[in-house]
């Protein structure tokens, strides 16, 4: 038989060491397991932002361009960034959000580069662009703006325009690494138009997209016109001398045939003629081709949505997006499908 004292010592040693060993193993297991916060996990979903290629990586002197001043009838050399300040002042209200103004600045700069890429212009062969909005972009000179609006406006509003141009210096919108045709207009009717449905030519970046904020922000979202039957018929007879249209029973003589994806009238039957909605817009002097007709006994009610041709960037839509927290590059990415921004200088 073993020594009883030795057995007792062994039992005591085991009774002490086993709990210690268990404690050590348990501690190691606790540390190996990640701590779980008792609070619920809140997942924040951030807006996807368009990454800008070469953003602010190029810092070169801005180029000088030839601009045909249609009011003076001569070509003027201008620093492109100074020219863009005049375009911004002519094309968009300085009261707009800075991000909308920046989007407009990039679009206007891109238009110049697109024109330069296209080569000589038939209306002004010695200049890249002109100051006539009917052909190129609206432009207001510094002197004109100061004389018209006063010193206070120049300090407050013009400085904001300069800021929008400066903070986007050199940036243009590209598709397949080439400057795009940056069409823009005042107000959409909730959707922009496919370019081919308005101008016949299709551009992959000028596609119909939703423009939901115009309705809440633009004062030009809706308009209405009331015309007597006599004036309505007269307007079409001025445009089409051989049209067969009478003042009686106009509802039986005028029918909208189809509309575009953006909601504008594509074709309409008027008497014995089938006419494009864009032509009707001109004939009746409507704000857009997105219209509906309601015939009464002696007059026609015309309800119109939007303002402008509807292709490209809606300026009031851009303002709405900016007010909702979108950045200028997000606005441009939305309205010009599949494009990227490139920093030229």
Image (spheres, grey):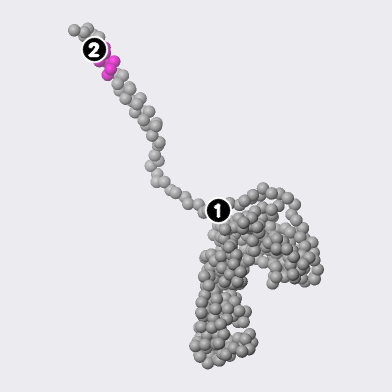
Q: Position of residue 246 (x, y in %)?
A: 56, 91
Queried whether the magenta region covers residue 14, the answer comes back as: yes
From the viewer's side, name the closer residue of 253 and 298. 253
Q: Position of residue 328 (x, y in %)?
A: 60, 57
Q: Residues within 10 Å of mark 2 (few under 14, many from 20)?
A: few
Measured along the vertical axis of the image, is residue 12 above or below residue 43?
above
Q: Residues within 10 Å of mark 1 (few under 14, many from 20)?
A: few
Point 33% across, 22% down: residue: 21
Dot 2 lies on which element? helix
Q: Toward which corner of the image does residue 121 lie, by quadrant?
A: bottom right
Q: Which mark is residue 49?
A: 1
Residue 153 seen anywhere in this rendered image of the structure:
no
Q: Which mark is residue 186?
A: none
Q: Toward which corner of the image does residue 113 lie, by quadrant?
A: bottom right
From the viewer's side, name the closer residue of 335 and 44. 335
The secondary structure making up most of the magenta span is helix
**Residue that carries the numbered disc 2 in the rendered image:** 8
Queried whether the magenta region covers residue 276, the answer comes back as: no
Point 55% across, 91% down: residue: 247
Point 36% across, 30% down: residue: 29
Left or right, 268 with reference to 108: left
Q: Are marks 2 and 1 in contact (CB under 8 Å)?
A: no
Give the Cα distance between marks 2 and 1: 75 Å
Q: Which residues are magenta?
A: 8-15
Measured along the vertical axis of the image, is residue 50 above or below residue 125?
above
Q: Mark 1 or mark 2, which is nearer the start of the sequence?
A: 2
Q: Position of residue 282 (x, y in %)?
A: 62, 79
Q: Toward which corner of the image does residue 273 lie, by quadrant?
A: bottom right
From the viewer's side, name the closer residue of 83 and 9. 83
């Amino acid at each position: 038989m073993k020594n009883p004292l030795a057995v007792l010592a062994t039992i005591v040693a085991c009774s002490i060491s086993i709990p210690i060993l268990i404690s050590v193993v348990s501690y190691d297991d606790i540390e190996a397991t990640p701590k779980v916060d008792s609070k619920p996990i809140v997942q924040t979903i951030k807006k996807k932002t368009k990454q800008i290629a070469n953003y602010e990586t190029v810092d070169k002197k801005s180029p000088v361009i030839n601009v045909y001043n249609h009011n003076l009838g001569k070509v003027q050399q201008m620093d492109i960034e100074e020219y863009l300040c005049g375009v911004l002042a002519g094309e968009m209200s300085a009261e707009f959000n800075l991000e909308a103004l920046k989007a407009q600045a990039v679009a206007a700069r891109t238009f110049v580069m697109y024109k330069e890429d296209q080569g000589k212009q038939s209306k002004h062969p010695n200049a890249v662009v002109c100051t006539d909005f009917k052909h190129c972009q609206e432009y207001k000179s510094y002197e004109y703006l100061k004389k018209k609006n006063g010193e206070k406006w120049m300090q407050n509003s013009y400085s904001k325009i300069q800021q929008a141009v400066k903070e986007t210096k050199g940036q243009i919108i590209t598709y397949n690494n080439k400057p795009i045709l940056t069409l823009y207009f005042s107000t959409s009717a909730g959707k922009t138009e496919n370019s081919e449905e308005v101008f016949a030519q299709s551009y992959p970046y000028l596609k119909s997209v939703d423009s939901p904020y115009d309705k809440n922000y633009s004062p030009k979202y809706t308009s209405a016109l009331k015309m007597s039957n006599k004036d309505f018929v007269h307007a079409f007879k001025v445009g089409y001398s051989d049209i067969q249209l009478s003042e009686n029973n106009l509802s039986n003589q005028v029918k909208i045939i189809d509309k575009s994806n953006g909601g504008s009238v594509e074709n309409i039957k008027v008497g014995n003629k089938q006419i494009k909605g864009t032509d009707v817009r001109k004939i009746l002097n409507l704000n857009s081709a997105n219209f509906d007709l309601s015939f009464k006994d002696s007059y026609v009610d015309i309800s119109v949505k939007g303002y402008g041709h509807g292709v490209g960037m809606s300026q009031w839509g851009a303002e709405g997006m900016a007010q909702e927290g979108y950045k200028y590059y997000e606005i441009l990415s939305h309205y010009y499908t599949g494009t990227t921004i490139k920093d030229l200088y």
